[in-house]
Amino acid sequence: MENNPSQTAAEQAEKVNFAKEVKQFYAGDFKTLFRVFFTDPFDGLYALFHTPSDKSSMQALILFASVFVLYFLGGFILAGQMREYMGFAGFLNIAVIPVLVMLTISAFSFLIKSISGKINFKSELLTGAVCGIPLALVVALAVVAKIFGSDGNLMTFFFNPMAVGSLVGVFMVYLLLMLVNVFYQSLTSGGTKPLFAWYLSPLAILLSFYLAITVSNNLFY
């Protein structure tokens, strides 16, 4: 079957455009997002979700893809001698879990706002994507722990961080609180009452992890 030249050219153009969007995002918008995330986690994130930019959907997709690649490569690097016992599916499982967490967070945001707030698809997708920032820090934490002689891998950090060390466990709780705050700011920006958002945010985050790990286990084991 011959390839359609026009279709091939269109696909190449899409790849070039996406690569350009990625480059522009990390050269500009990501720096702003990263700064807001850590320096203005309340009003800054609220404004981000309340009035998402026209590029927020593309930016969200870039963050989803970036977290997937980061976990896949991070899992491969941190596996060490265990690489020879892990197939492609094992590393794929490691990379899929955080992406499923982010997607589930977006789904919960959409569901809750459809009942108690105002739905904005860009905002819901961005909610899960922004949660990729603290999730990405888990990889950085795992690398630092590895440098200092820890035998833990990315899965250990998810399932039993205290086994790696009490300091790591405390930091993981800190990252969990970051996720809760992102979800809370997203809900309140959509009109959900603060009291409901305060109770629903940690529940949604914990359920997102549970559902993501359950789905991943059913897919790869």
Image (cartoon, rainbow, N blue to C red):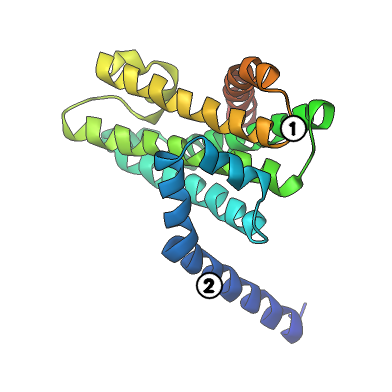
Which residue is tagged 1? 191
The image's mark for residue 202 is none
Residue appearing at x 46%, y 24% in the figure: 176
Q: Quadrant of residue 50?
A: top right
Would residue 65 be seen by someone viewing this image from the given angle? yes
Residue toward you, 68 or 85: 68
* 9 relative to 70, above or below: below
Label 2 Cα crowd, 10 Å radius (few <14 / some 14-19 / many 20+): few
Query: Does residue 39 sit above or below 31 in this rendering?
Result: above
Residue, x 47% and y 68% (percent of image)? 23
Residue 4 placed where, x, y %?
A: 76, 82
**Which of disc 2 and disc 1 is earlier in sequence?**
2
Position of 13 with respect to 158 (left or right) is right
Query: SS of the residue at dot 1?
Result: loop
Q: Which residue is mark 2?
A: 20
* Secondary element at image label 2: helix
Position of residue 153 measured from the top left corner of the image (x, y, whole percent): 34, 28
User: Residue 165, can we see it?
Assistant: no
Nearer to me, 151 or 199 = 199
